Amino acid sequence: MCLSIVIPTVRYMPSLDEAIRSVFDNVTVDFTINVSVNNQSLDSFLSSRYIDHCDVNWLCTNAQTVPIWDSFNIAVESAGSEWIYILSDDDLILPGFLKGVDLKKKDSGYLYATKIIVEDHMCRRESCSPSQEQLNNNNPLDLFFAKQVFHNHISLFVFNIKMFHDVGGFQRRGYPNGYFVDTVFHSHLLANSTHVEVSDGPVFLRKQTSNQGSAKFYLNRIVNSYIHEVVEGFWSNDKCREYLRFVYGNQRIHRKHLFYQRFGTEISKLNNRVYNQSAFKAFLDTSWLSFNAIFTWRTDFSSKKKIISIYLGYCRKALKCILKRMLFFK
């Protein structure tokens, strides 16, 4: 098979069947589906309607559950195809996926970037993605790091197995649940790519829940104590390191920028209905966690000053949002 759709998972959920169905419905190139179970048994998957499907390969990868980077590496290595696409077990492929793309004619440095739609219980919205013109006229790493026009998620790229090996796969470092593991991997793919092509329209649907969008995880001081390992991961690739050294100078400055970026992203969700059903509850929960994070994150005082200014700015916006809603529903 030319393309393997790899679906890493741990336990059965009905959304897995929906993900598999979306592959059959919307992928028109020659493909195989590989469900990689990060566990020792398929018992919980017996209720899946695809458990005996001849076109779905099921693989128990380990005698016990392993960290997510090992799970991803094993899943990709076991796929047995030249091209790989990793699909989350609770997301969907949409019509138009790989439309007009002949992977057999692409070299190993080719990347296919998916535009995505984010969905929650309230709405759907198209997320940020670079245009083909932007990709043609800019260093892809600029778009990834400095301009942040990629919506990073595990299902961002179709990539070649050779490039997977060239960049060393998913790195075994950082917080065990995979904090930034896909971001580091994708930066290395971009640094080593020869051509990046973006889909014509949204071809991937990412389902969001309030739990996924919660700042409780990302602002946790234990989680963020691993941030130095994340930065070391970005810098471990030669081509990526060359770019990052030019932009940031050293890892310490890059680490500061990553702190600002992560803090700003998570605290901004105070005003985002996709992530928070209750603006007031979100404000209380996130404000306390954010305030705590400012003084417990392992960073210097100048970084804390900037983070505080970001925090206060978003607090003002959040309070305005709450007041508007109170007046609207009065």
Image: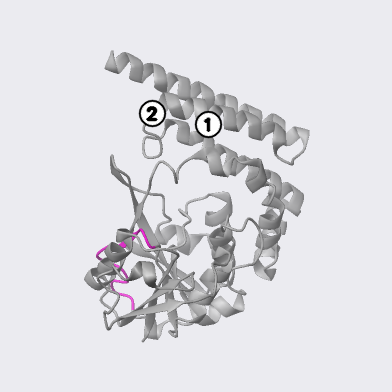
Q: Position of residue 221 (x, y in %)?
A: 66, 41
Which segment is the magenta one?
89-101
Specify whether residue 251 is in view: yes
Q: Position of residue 275 (x, y in %)?
A: 40, 39
Amino acid carrying label 1: it is: Thr
Q: Which residue is mark 2?
A: 278
Which quarter of the figure is the C terminus placed in?
top left
Amino acid carrying label 2: it is: Ser
Q: Residue at x 71, y 32 (%)?
A: 295
Which disc number belongs to residue 190?
Answer: none
Which disc number belongs to residue 286?
Answer: 1
Is residue 122 depicted above or below 138 in this figure? above
Q: Residue at x 56, y 57 (%)?
A: 177
Q: Earlier in the sequence, mark 1 or mark 2?
A: 2
Main SS, magenta region, reads: loop
The secondary element bearing badge 1 is classed as helix
Is residue 74 depicted above or below 104 in this figure? above
Which is more toward the observer, 268 or 13? 13
154 in the magenta segment: no
Q: Position of residue 200 (x, y in %)?
A: 31, 62
Q: Quadrant of residue 82?
A: bottom left
Specify whether residue 249 is in view: no
Q: Quadrant of residue 91?
A: bottom left
